[in-house]
Amino acid sequence: MGAEVAKTNVWSELRISSTPHLSVSMSSNLTVLAMIADALAGRRRGLPEPLRRAIASRVGRSGHAAVRPLAAPGYSVAPDAVVPRAPVGDVSVHSQISALRDTSPDTLIRDLEQAFGAGPLPGHWRAAADRPAQWLSGYADALTDVWNAVEPLWERALPLLRKEVERIGVASVRGGPELLFGSLTDRIVGTEDGLLIGDIEASRFELGERPVILVPMLAGRDALIVSLDNPEVVWIGYPLPGAESLWRPGAAPAVDELSALVGPVRAALLDMLDRPMTMSMLAARLQIAPSGLTYHCDRLSAARLIVRERRGREVWISRTERAGELLGLFRG
């Protein structure tokens, strides 16, 4: 499986040749993995420091030792045993822990060989290969300890999770899959051929006929966990919109469906474009720095919602017909 990725200029590509079948999984086990990666393994992705410390303090020595391989710099690949049950349905943490407890040491060795080939293992996984039963037990302990700390937060997040399931349904029908994927996180970019996914190690995959499962997680805003190499399914774990309100009081939710789909800044930008406007005019009206405006325009252009035209020294922005149809669906 692909582990959590870091901010990088390296991208994995998922080529999509036809409209994918999408579903949503409310699997709490990926939330626990994201919390482990951030709070224990050192891959900081935006959790507030008090929550990070609280989670780390609940995990025993064996759990801390077991999660160290997930923090190795330069690697995004991990054995399937890290997620023994793929989130095809709403997979609970308890079922994941039970699957780990039932996993044989030989299975872990085979998973490691499948992930890294038949040659020497990377150094950060050698201790697990030398003592697979100990690693499996320690990792199950880490999941248990983290879930005990995070479960109350998950219960509080259930209304947000249900809202996200509704948002995905609306966005996939009204906005199209490519726009939906781009709304999950800034670390997924839609292209004409599929998706670019921020990664540590570049790779390329064909979606084929596989379904795509989206898994919202309670996690920092930069968290992303993906599995692109499973022959049966692709799944993408991404930060649940509005999750920061659970630990950062005062965070404002999206005001409407269009804002939830493309983000409030981009929704406001599209609203303003009843007539073509220059970049400087938009920057002044949105009260946003030119660099920030360029970023949002890049994303809207990639989604084929705006076009840019240089006229002399100015760049003019116009809404596309597709954007007009989208506004009509959400605001009509």
Image (cartoon, grey):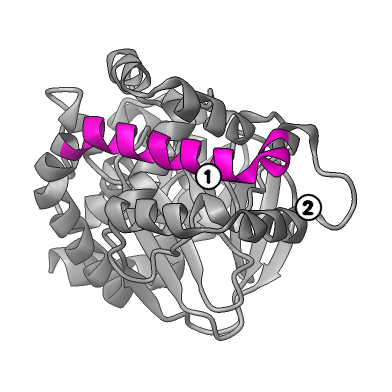
Q: Which residue is mark 2?
A: 116
Identify which amino acid the numbered label 2 is placed on: Phe
- Can residue 307 be seen? no
Say above or below: 297 vs 21.
Answer: above
Residue 243 position within the rendered picture, expressed as x and y whole percent measured from the top left = 23, 38
Query: Which quarter of the rendered picture does the N terminus lie within?
Result: bottom right
Circle 2 Cα neighbour tier, 10 Å, few/some/many (<14 / 14–19 / ≥20): some
Image quadrant of residue 269? top left
Q: Residue at x 40, y 49 (%)?
A: 238
Say above or below: 178 vs 37.
Answer: below
Q: Residue at x 64, y 66 (%)?
A: 229
Q: Nearer the viewer, mark 1 or mark 2?
A: 1
Q: Which residue is mark 1?
A: 136
Q: Pick the residue in front: 329 or 191.
A: 191
**Left or right: residue 174 compared with residue 12:** left
Query: Which quarter of the rendered picture does the C terminus lie within?
Result: bottom left
Q: Which mark is residue 108?
A: none
Q: CA distance from mark 1 to mark 2?
A: 18 Å
Residue that sits furthest to the right in the current view: 119
SS for callout 1: helix
Residue 151 position within the rendered picture, expressed as x and y whole percent measured from the top left = 19, 39
SS for callout 2: helix
**Left or right: residue 221 compared with residue 40:** left
Q: Residue at x 63, y 53 (%)?
A: 79
- Can residue 211 be seen? yes
Magenta-colored span = 127-151
Q: Residue at x 47, y 80 (%)?
A: 20
